[in-house]
Amino acid sequence: MINDWSKLLKSQIVKKEIEKRRTFAIISHPDAGKTTLTEKFLLYGGQINEAGSVKGKATARHAVSDWMEIEKQRGISVTSSVLQFRYNNMCINLLDTPGHQDFSEDTYRTLMAADSAVMVIDGAKGVEPQTRKLFKVCVMRHIPIFTFINKMDREAMDTFELMDDIEKELGILTCPINWPIGSGKNFKGVYDRKTKIVKLFSDTMKGTKEGEEEDLLINDPALKEKIGNDMLSRLEDEMELLDGASEPLNMDEVRAGRQTPVFFGSALTNFGVETFLKHFLKMTSSPLPRHSDKGYIDPFSDDFSAFVFKIQANMNKNHRDRIAFMRICSGRFEAGMEAFHVQGGKNVRLSQPQTMMADSRHMVDEAYAGDIIGIFDPGIYSIGDTITTAKEPFRFDGIPTFAPEHFARVRQVDTMKRKQFTKGIMQIAQEGAIQIFQEYNTGLEEVIVGVVGVLQFDVLKFRLKSEYNVDIIMENLPYEYIRWVVPSPDLDMENLVGTSDMKKVMDLKGRPLLLWVNEWSIRMTEERNKGLLLEEFGKN
């Protein structure tokens, strides 16, 4: 009887903890202020005392969420970082993603681990090319998207134009929760449409402290003194127009990813950041059931389950190690527990669990559904792997691999450093940052590297030098199209009749692939080899 009571109590505690969890990713075009907004969330969560703007020219501080040396040097995010903080009794897992399109594959994998996304848009520029690409990735996931229109302390586009831009460019309905009063030097604050309260803001030492805010009702006579008669009458006119023309907030549409609640502010000066955070936490839900080959898995289940969405080697020069990042999907995790690694087919001990604040680590004793943890990886995990304590193991849906669009032949300068070169390039490939191929029926003497964006070549060069002390020679190849050859009993790769611009390669798992320079060569190859089945990349 006592045992039953303790089980019940334990499951109630687990349920309460899971209900506190919110897991979201931040996406944006480079320079829209995504990393700065991330830092401000952490400032409110009490994780950092002073937020480090990415520019960082006045001081030598770097953004907390940028941990890789190349990120600190270039002021851009090239990997996704995982940050956890608490705010108002909620436990928030925030996934900061790279803004640059060359790293959109990393962003996609990160979105697989998130329950919702925050889209940051620059008020002066509206929807930019990269926002479009990342937004498509969000749509593929069918997750709720919340929009924060940033940099209102600089001259911005007309607010109605911004709404129109989002609806036309991204094909999603907008619902402004608050509305800006002016922009640039005339930015006075934001008006909350539901409470009819105007939040007035003061500058906050460039946003390094939490802002002082003053709240006034729209009919308060003091408001006219604060913002001026012209601004007030313009606000009233805009509200009348908005109330008549805009769609009301529909949370079912938001949850389906068809409508986005919109907020305005300035991350750099802390305008509207906490308001956004409070609304966001109210509107989002605790972890949702996740699909597997045995149906949906309930997050409140007693069985622990998680999947690997990212692998990162050498996060810290003091720890030459490899971390597998896992999103917990159900149950409770305990440090040192044993679980079944489905793809590996055996039980594993989950050791050295940690949560991250960029490159600083905190060991954890326990974690719950919705949390992101890093586990020491002795080289056994791959992206997309499932780990569970369920009696009947299952697999979560795989994570798609983007087909590379740029290829280069890579070799080390110093032949004596063959071992370091092979180790480095294999580790970076296992992280999913690059894909490596070898000539059909040869070893790893000559490696062909495939990437989604050319900037990944720079990162490869930089990391091999800084982490493995290997200089490389890179020769760009003209191939642009890649297909995976579906195995069949009649397949004879040796005697495959190709085109003059075709190359046969194999991936790390020994699967045959074909590369072409021209798109029409794919069809010709299929016509010349009856029964040949080609696929774009499968799933991890």
Image (tube, rainbow, N blue to C red):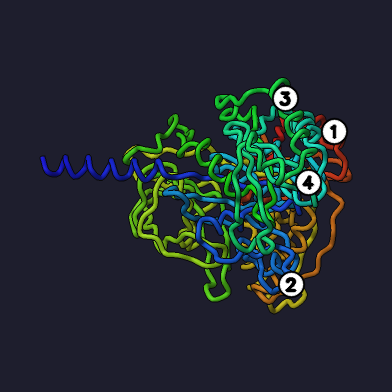
> Which circle marks residue 58 in the picture?
2
Secondary element at tag 3: helix
Left or right of 268 on screen, residue 95: left
Camera-nearest residue between 308 and 525:
308
Query: Which quadrant of the rendered structure holds the N terminus?
Result: top left
What residue type is disc 3 on? Answer: Glu
Judging by the rendered image, the residue that carries numbered circle 3 is 240
> In whole angstroms, how far apart are the C-alphas of marks 1 and 3?
61 Å
In the depicted structure, whether residue 78 falls above or below residue 393: below
Mark toward the start of the polypeptide (1 vs 2): 2
Q: Residues within 10 Å of mark 3 (few under 14, many from 20)?
A: few
Q: Is residue 487 visible?
A: no
Q: Residues within 10 Å of mark 4 (few under 14, many from 20)?
A: many
> In whole angstroms, how far apart are the C-alphas of marks 3 and 4?
20 Å
Q: Is residue 380 visible?
A: yes
Mark toward the start of the polypeptide (1 vs 3): 3
Q: Mark 3 and 4 residues: CB-CB less than 8 Å, in contact? A: no
Q: Mark 4 and 2 residues: CB-CB less than 8 Å, in contact? A: no
Judging by the rendered image, the residue that carries numbered circle 4 is 183
Query: Which quadrant of the rendered structure holds the C terminus?
Result: top right
Q: Residue at x 39, y 57 (%)?
A: 350
Mark toward the start of the polypeptide (4 vs 1): 4
Q: Mark 1 and 3 residues: CB-CB less than 8 Å, in contact? A: no
Mark toward the start of the polypeptide (2 vs 3): 2
What residue type is disc 1 on? Answer: Met
> In whole angstroms, how far apart are the C-alphas of marks 1 and 2?
58 Å
> Which circle marks residue 159 in the picture?
none
Judging by the rendered image, the residue that carries numbered circle 1 is 524
Q: Residue at x 78, y 36 (%)?
A: 159
> In whole angstroms, how far apart are the C-alphas of marks 2 and 3?
44 Å
Q: Mark 2 and 3 residues: CB-CB less than 8 Å, in contact? A: no
In the depicted structure, whether residue 204 falls above or below residue 396: below
